Image: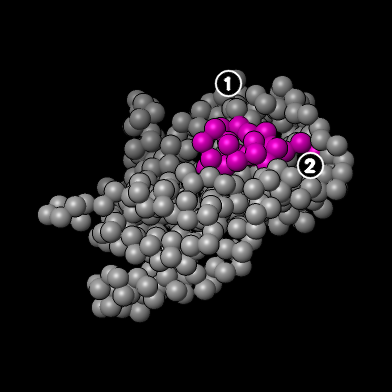
């Protein structure tokens, strides 16, 4: 029996734990029909309490299942294709919940906000969840979706009145772009709230960029209700006004030399890690991509001057590689190569040394 053959009657006794498992199975089966029916059932019938029920479905059913999608991909228990399919179905489920709750919503009374992902950010589902929760709580929402170029975001703000801009980003490498977007929005006199994993623990990078920060959709609603201070209308400020360390030019110079850093690191790894010499062309391409991501993460850590950002990324990469049968020690030649190449850059070498020291590598006789 496929998941789509489960009867609605069987759903009636399901707890939320069981609903999450049902949705997970539907995602793995690429069964959009059953997934949508499941979330609609969870919202329920009737107008009374439907908005609250819809919010619970978004935050306690769809969101944790989507988080599981990421965890299972990282552990190499589902493929990239399965991850994409599951995300697409969950996006359809969010739309179904919004449609089911629409009859219970009154006209917006609290104000209007614009929700968008920063340019380059394709992970739009977290922003969509925030947009729909705010809509359920009475806010008018302009949801612009994934990877919105800053110039288009600003053009939208000139055309549509907003009480605040909510910017979402999941990938730390987008922080320089996010910073530019925050500054540009604030220059129009509109306050900005940032959210998403890219902005660090407790939103540390958002705060450094003079943006408000919320950990989740409910937190965003609370901050909006409290009111955000409107910035002065002015020219967008330069990044080093918020991040004075940028004046040392390390970020700029390392970023400009990125292509050569990746090329030399790839060559050095081949000498220091003999198994790579037997890699297929596809494996070499994947290795080059991994090095590119490592260098990009280092550049981002230089931008915000935070070694923890890079150390966390290296540990995450080691976990990803380990799940795919590549030993963590394969990262050491890459870090050593970058340390050698960037010997004249004290902040960069400090960040690299800290990450290298934190990387857990099995000793002799231990499994790799």
Alpha-carbon span between mark 2 and mark 1: 37 Å
Q: Quadrant of residue 163?
A: top right
Mark 2 Cα within 10 Å, few/some/many (few <14, many 20+)? many
Q: Nearer the viewer, residue 95 or 367?
A: 367
Residue at 68% of width from left, 41% of height from top?
209
Q: How many marks?
A: 2
Q: Position of residue 282 (x, y in %)?
A: 36, 75
- Residue highlighted by disc 2: 186
Q: Secondary structure at mark 1?
A: loop
The part of the image, by quadrant, that contains residue 190 is: top right
- CB within 8 Å, label 2 to label 1: no
Circle nearer the viewer, 2 or 1: 2
Ranked by sequence position, the earlier of labels 2 and 1 is 1
Taking the magenta stretch, the answer to whether it contains residue 353 is no
| Quadrant for the C terminus in the image | bottom left
Q: Nearer the viewer, residue 253 or 331?
A: 253
Q: Is residue 209 left or right of residue 288?
A: right
Q: Secondary structure at mark 2?
A: helix
Residue shown at the point (37%, 52%) measured from the top left: 356
Q: Is residue 261 left or right of residue 141?
A: left
147 to 101, vertically: above or below: below
Report whether residue 4 is seen: no
Image location (x, y in percent) of residue 24: 37, 43
Give the residues in magenta.
190-216
Residue displayed at 35% across by 39% down: 22
Kindly give the residue lying farthest to the left in the view shown.
365
* Rendered position, 153 above or below 134: below
Is 291 left, or right, of 54 in this rendering?
left
Asked if one can make out residue 212 in the rendered structure from this viewpoint, the answer is yes
User: Residue 354: where, in percent of width, then height?
Assistant: 41, 48
| Label of residue 49 in the image | 1
Drawn side of residue 286 relative to residue 295, left or right = left
């Amino acid at each position: 029996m496929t998941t789509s053959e489960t009867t609605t009657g069987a759903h009636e006794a399901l707890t939320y734990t069981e609903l999450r498992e049902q949705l997970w199975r539907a995602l793995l089966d690429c069964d959009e029909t059953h997934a949508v029916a499941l979330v609609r059932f969870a919202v329920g019938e009737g107008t009374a309490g439907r908005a609250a029920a819809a919010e619970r479905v978004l935050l306690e059913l769809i969101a944790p299942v989507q988080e599981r999608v990421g965890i299972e991909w990282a552990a190499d228990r589902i493929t990239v294709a399965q991850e994409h399919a599951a995300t697409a179905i969950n996006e359809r489920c969010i739309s179904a919940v919004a449609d089911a709750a629409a009859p219970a919503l009154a006209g917006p009374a609290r104000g209007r906000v614009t929700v968008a992902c920063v340019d380059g950010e394709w992970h739009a589902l977290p922003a969509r969840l925030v947009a729909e929760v705010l809509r359920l709580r009475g806010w008018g929402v302009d949801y612009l979706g994934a990877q919105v170029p800053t110039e288009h975001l600003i053009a939208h703000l000139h055309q549509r009145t907003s009480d605040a801009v909510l910017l979402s980003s999941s990938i730390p490498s987008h922080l320089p772009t996010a910073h530019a977007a925050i500054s540009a929005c604030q220059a129009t006199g509109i306050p900005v709230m940032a959210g998403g994993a890219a902005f660090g623990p407790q939103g540390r990078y958002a705060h450094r960029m003079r943006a408000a920060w919320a950990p989740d959709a409910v937190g965003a609603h609370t901050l909006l209700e409290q009111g955000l201070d409107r910035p002065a209308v002015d020219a967008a400020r330069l990044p080093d006004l918020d991040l004075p360390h940028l004046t040392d030019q390390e970020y700029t110079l390392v970023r400009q030399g990125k292509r050569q850093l990746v090329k030399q690191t790839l060559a050095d790894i081949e000498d220091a890690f003999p198994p790579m010499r037997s890699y297929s062309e596809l494996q070499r391409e994947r290795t080059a991509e991994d090095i590119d991501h490592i260098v990009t993460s280092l550049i981002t850590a230089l931008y915000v001057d935070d070694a923890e950002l890079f150390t966390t990324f290296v540990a995450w990469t080691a976990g990803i590689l380990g799940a795919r049968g590549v030993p963590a020690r394969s990262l050491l030649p890459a870090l050593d190569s970058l340390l050698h190449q960037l010997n004249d850059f004290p902040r960069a070498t400090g960040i690299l040394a800290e990450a290298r020291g934190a990387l857990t590598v099995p000793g002799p006789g231990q499994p790799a």
